[in-house]
Image (cartoon, rainbow, N blue to C red):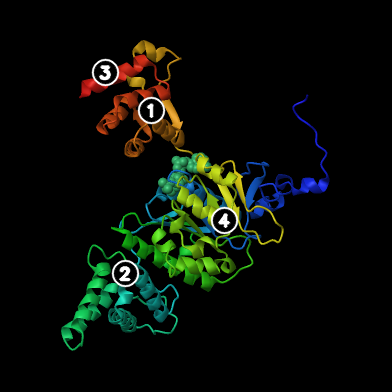
């Protein structure tokens, strides 16, 4: 008896078999676009189709990227921005929470604006907005970030003082601003309120005092990041190529969120002012990486960009480790979701619930390696096919970081001459990192070692490395298993420990 039995199947029977009629990948004509008008991302896993992204067929150009730390979110963003700039001349503005993009932006010839490290943004800058509208935007930011909306009197006092400051500086509240005129700052606003307090005629002095206290948080010396003349021309934000707004120097999340909201508000104004053009592709991409505080508030301007971005050719990319941190309004409105490795069942539940993919895809996402991804696209079409598919790996545009451990110094002269003994061991960062993980190093130790290597130009002598490890109290057996893992002989391993003992 043969193992395989040929069955007679009628074609209508066959068509009921899901795999045959509906393979778990969109048809290639949806994935493969004109290379001069699309962005290459990677090769699909099932049918090997080069997936080139374009938003012509999508509900909108916005993208959400989710995945655990180290899964490749920022790598995807960098690759995407680089290609968008090649293909469409797309400008990019990165709201850089942790200063993750600085080195890459510098290397790519972009501009880095480092708040609190020499750069300032005046919250009262108008960039073409009427002062009345700007006051509304600032109050909206205060509503999101503070509890001022629970204190209507303080809210009113703040808004009125801002309007007064614009009037005093010679602006008309409801007229378009003269760009040559100097805008006031929150310091002027605070001063107006202080004068009012001193006059002593105001009915509720406690309310006034609290209002002043609130504003001083943003205007006191040393923390006046948003209360000094801007060091950048905000009006040019969306037309300056690649711009990284580094927020890592700001003292806390509230300041970072304030800066991020301010940038989004400014971009929104610019977007409307520029209007639609007949150019292909996207004019600008705005990146929010881990900016959950502003990505998950209903009132955030991120939501307006999401709702109206398409018609102005503005795209938003939101990246997060935790998909539930991204507001529903954003999540359900993005045209593309890139899912890198996700471990937590509750995040997988959330994604599967909202994007409706198969158990097969869910399992894949849980087991992805770095750079592997499932993609959800909401195509504008009545043709039925699965929206979620897997790509082998996001094919990078970012130079890979190589790290080297040198052992030359612990070799004897005769060993030095032997060609069979390597003098150094080089790995890409991910491989190095997985060797650390395999050996059982803690996450903190791994971070310290990379930091140590980064500060030494990505090259480290084996003895310096062992010192870091022993300072981190890494178990000796774990060290041995790491050294074996990179390929050191037992003789050399013993020698390394000899050096370590001698230094103690
Ligand atoms: N597709 C890829 N191909 C090659 N290397 C990759 C790829 N994706 C990520 N990497 C490498 O993996 C490392 C981690 O990637 P990345 O910084 O993008 O992670 P992340 O998801 O942004 O993490 P975090 O949440 O901590 O910011 C980087 O060194 C990066 O160069
Ligand atoms: Mg990242």
> In 3D space, how far apart are the residues under numbered discs 1 and 3 (Cα atoms)?
18 Å
Q: Nearer the viewer, mark 4 or mark 3?
A: 4
Q: Which residue is mark 2?
A: 146
**Residue 355: numbered disc:** 4
Mark 4 vs 1, N-terminal side: 4
Query: Residue 12, can we see it?
Result: yes
Q: Is residue 226 left or right of residue 201?
A: right
Sooner in the amino-acid sequence: mark 2 or mark 1: 2
Would residue 420 appear left or right of 84 to someone viewing this image? left
Cα distance in 3D space between marks 2 and 1: 49 Å
Q: Residue at x 48, y 72 (%)?
A: 269
Residue wearing tag 1: 405
User: Between tags 2 and 1, which lies in front?
Assistant: 2
Pointer 3 or 2: first along the chain: 2
Q: Secondary structure at mark 1?
A: strand
| C-alpha span from label 4 to label 3 | 56 Å
Mark toward the viewer: 3 or 2: 2
Residue at 41% from the left image edge and 63% from the top image edge? 294
Single out the residue that lies furthest toward the front. Answer: 1
Where is residue 288? Give x, y as percent: 45, 58
422 is higher (above) or lower (below) than 376: above
- Quadrant (top left/top right/bottom left/bottom right) for the N terminus: top right
Query: Measured along the vertical axis of the image, is residue 473 above or below residue 116?
Result: above
Q: Work out which quarter of the rendered image holds the C terminus and state it.
A: top left
């Amino acid at each position: 008896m043969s193992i395989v039995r040929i069955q007679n199947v009628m074609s209508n029977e066959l068509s009921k078999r899901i795999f045959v009629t509906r393979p778990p990948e969109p048809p290639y004509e949806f994935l493969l676009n004109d290379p001069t008008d699309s962005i290459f991302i990677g090769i699909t896993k099932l049918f090997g189709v080069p997936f080139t992204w374009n938003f012509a067929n999508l509900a909108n150009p916005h993208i959400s990227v989710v995945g655990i730390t180290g899964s490749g979110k920022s790598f995807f963003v960098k690759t995407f921005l680089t290609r968008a700039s090649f293909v469409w001349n797309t400008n990019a503005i990165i709201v850089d929470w942790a200063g993750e993009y600085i080195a890459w932006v510098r290397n790519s010839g972009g501009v880095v604006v480092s708040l609190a490290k020499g750069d300032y943004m005046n919250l009262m800058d108008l960039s073409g907005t009427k002062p009345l509208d700007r006051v509304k935007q600032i109050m909206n930011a205060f509503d999101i970030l503070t509890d001022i909306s629970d204190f209507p009197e303080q809210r009113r006092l703040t808004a009125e003082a801002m309007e007064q400051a614009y009037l005093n500086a010679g602006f008309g509240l409801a007229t378009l601003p003269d760009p040559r005129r100097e805008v006031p700052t929150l310091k002027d606003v605070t001063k107006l309120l202080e004068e009012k307090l001193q006059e002593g005629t105001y009915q509720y002095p406690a309310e006034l005092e609290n209002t002043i206290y609130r504003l001083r948080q943003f205007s006191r010396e040393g923390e006046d990041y948003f209360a000094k003349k801007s060091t950048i021309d905000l009006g040019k934000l969306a037309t300056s190529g690649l711009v990284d707004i580094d927020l890592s120097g700001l003292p806390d999340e509230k300041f970072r969120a304030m800066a991020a909201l301010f940038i989004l508000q400014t971009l929104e104004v610019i977007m409307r002012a520029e209007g639609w053009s007949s150019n292909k592709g996207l004019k600008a991409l705005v990146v929010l990486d881990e900016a959950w505080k502003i990505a998950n508030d209903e009132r955030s301007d991120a939501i307006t960009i999401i709702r109206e971005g398409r018609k102005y050719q503005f795209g938003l990319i939101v990246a997060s480790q935790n998909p539930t941190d991204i507001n529903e309004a954003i999540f359900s409105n993005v045209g593309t979701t890139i899912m890198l490795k996700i471990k937590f069942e509750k995040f997988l539940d959330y994604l599967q619930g909202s994007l409706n993919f198969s158990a097969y895809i869910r399992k894949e996402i849980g087991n992805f390696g770095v750079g592997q991804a499932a993609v959800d696209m909401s195509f504008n079409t009545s043709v039925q096919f699965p929206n979620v598919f897997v790509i082998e790996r996001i094919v990078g545009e970012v130079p890979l970081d190589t790290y080297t451990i040198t052992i030359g110094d612990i070799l004897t002269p005769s060993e030095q001459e032997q060609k069979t003994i390597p003098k150094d061991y080089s790995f890409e960062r991910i491989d190095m990192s997985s060797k650390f993980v395999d050996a059982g190093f803690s996450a903190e130790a791994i971070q310290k070692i990379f930091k140590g290597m980064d500060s030494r130009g990505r090259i480290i002598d084996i003895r310096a490395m062992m010192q870091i490890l022993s300072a981190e109290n890494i178990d000796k057996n774990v060290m041995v298993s790491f050294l074996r893992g990179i390929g050191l002989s037992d003789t050399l391993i013993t020698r390394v420990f000899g050096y370590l003992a001698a230094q103690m």
